[in-house]
Amino acid sequence: MRIVRGAVAGTLESSDVLVRVEPCDHCLEIVIESPVRRQFYEDIKKVVDLTLADFSVTKGRICLNDRGALDCVIAARLETAILRGGERQ
């Protein structure tokens, strides 16, 4: 899957995550913002990496603004943003 346009999924409500994906032709950039970043960064990053791998996303800018979302919510929001902004290769 290739990110061809910007897309958003989620909200900034408590226990949710706002995910933005944007095209980037030269690299995969992941930005994670969260008030619990110090405690849960590795867990969030693992979910993001697995979800991106499931969709074979290797390039793009992925921005997450986490508000304490569970792993399944992070994966679902990221999947939705990828499907909205992506195109099968």
Image: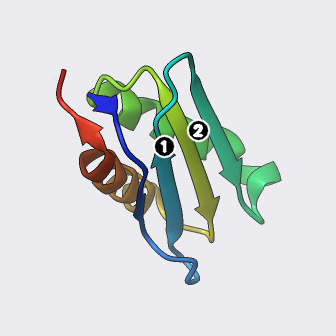
Residue assigned mark 2: 45
| Mark 1 residue element | strand
Residue assigned mark 1: 22
> Could you tell me residue 46's position as x and y percent?
53, 35
Q: Nearer the viewer, residue 78 or 43?
A: 78
Sequence order check: which comes first, mark 1 or mark 2?
1
Q: Residue at x 61, y 30 (%)?
A: 29
Quadrant showing the N terminus: top left
Amino acid type of disc 2?
Lys
Which residue extends farthest top?
26
> Could you tell me residue 85's position as x and y percent?
32, 47
Do callouts 1 and 2 mark residues in contact (Cβ within 8 Å)?
no
Side (left or right) of 4 relative to 11: left
Task: Write down the quadrant of residue 34 in the picture.
Answer: bottom right
Q: Is residue 77 above or below residue 13?
A: above
Q: Nearer the viewer, residue 55 or 27?
A: 27
Side (left or right) of 43 relative to 84: right
